[in-house]
Image: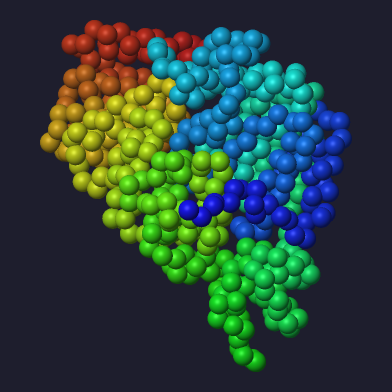
Amino acid sequence: MRGIPSVEADAQLVGRERELASLREVFERPHGPCVVVLGGSPGIGKTSLWEAGIAAARERGFQELTARASSAEAELSFATLTDLLDGVELGSLESLPAPQRRALEVALLRAEPAGQPPSSRAIALGFLNVVRSLSRGGSVLIAVDDVQWLDSASRAVLAFAMRRLESEPVVFLLATRPGDLADLERASTARATRIDVGPLSLGAIRLLLSERLGLSLPRHALRRLVDSTVGNPLFALEVGRSLRADGLPGAGEELPVPDRVEELLEVRVAALSPRVRRLLLAVALTSDLRVSRLPPSIKFDAVEDAVEAGVLVIDGDRMRASHPLFAAAARKRSTARQRRELHIELVEMAADEQLRARHLALAASVPDRDVAQRVAGAASTAAARGARHLAVELGEHALRLTPASCAERVERLLELASYLETAGELQRVTDVLTAELAAIPPGPYRARAWLLLAEGAHIEHVDAYRAHLERALEQAQDDPVLRALVVAKMSSAVIAVERIA
């Protein structure tokens, strides 16, 4: 069996002396909180510098909290936070208050939810105090790659911590595409260092092609390649591979360079064997694919071939595309049927019931009562642990998969509206319910709908709020619990009017 190189095997950097010097300076000087942003276009080399920054911090004894955000998990609440705190034993942090520890454990799927869902504030405070506790034992690095794919719940937690760290020796190392970090940069009151990762020079591209591909080009051809790829190293390597395979173009002919790097990578992915493309598609559909637990249709030979082709990297037991654009290209070239088939296989690979239910839902193209019931249960569990956006996504799937004739459909509709309200998506609460209000049976169901509509984005005045509650009260006459809830809300509306007056 051929050996598989680890992530460190491709860690050499070419032509980045200035950026590396800036990174080392950050980790060598005494500091309180500090934010380092590596910004640049896709394929420009941000991830390699991000990994170099982690290595520099490790050499200086930093404690590491690291995560690679993924497009496959951008909608999964607390996905990045879970990775950052992987390996941190919350129970050993004596200074972490019990309510915050409990909130984090539920959010991170380390404890079963019970009672009310953990509040966003308790989760964010818990993370902040974990970081403070770790910083008492030495400097801490919080490193996130591909911040553009950071899930919104984790993003809010990071922003919360950034605003409140004062003198703690904590460095945030964030790699992202241009224009994506405005909210986090505004949140941070710490010293900020922005490292713009720009094009490589002609000499650096020459060295890169030589070291990675064993390719030496005449100067005129090298100049054309650098100009055509705008010094983007990933783009240059892909064009170099084409030239190595097909030879240099003739005099007066153009280099085979598409307008965008994404187009070139799509051509590269199309040329891979079907089994390697399927493996890349699996990586695109889940960021937690393991060498030790491959889907049944993917054999280990495909892993070896993908690594040898330079499109896959092994990091411990986990696999990831050598660049997210390879995974994106595999997904773009796949059919809906291929994706559904893989989602079915990934059901048993997923780490928890909510992810299993998500794969099951994505594999289903027509209503299915049993699948809908399982997905609805997972949505309820996600809501109970404070994973608001995941609850919304699963709630949408549960409603989509519930046959129109099923009695549970109205309940699924109201559950989805409730998840949307909790997630702060008030316009969608209005849109979802007004479209189906007439089909909701009179009585408690319609009362609940009017209650939820009272919180919708279309409500701008207290009078409109009370009018919706009065409609809810009319429908709740035979349900004393629901009636009491409506009366309590009406009383709150009266108090609000009195305060304004």
Whole-percent x, y for residue 252 in the image: 64, 91
Q: Nearer the viewer, residue 169 or 349?
A: 349
Q: How is the image coloured?
A: rainbow
Q: Quadrant of residue 278?
A: bottom left
**Residue at 68% across / 52% down in the picture?**
11
**Residue at 39% across / 30% down in the picture?**
352
Q: Is residue 322 visible?
A: yes
Count up the numbered dots.
Answer: 0
Whole-percent x, y for residue 254 in the image: 61, 84
Left or right: 446 with respect to 159? left
**Residue at 69% across / 21% down in the picture?**
134
Q: Nearer the viewer, residue 373 or 411?
A: 373
Q: Is residue 435 visible?
A: no
Q: Nearer the viewer, residue 296 or 376?
A: 296
Give above or below for 106 relative to 287: above
Whole-percent x, y for residue 190 in the image: 77, 32
Give above or below for 491 relative to 60: above
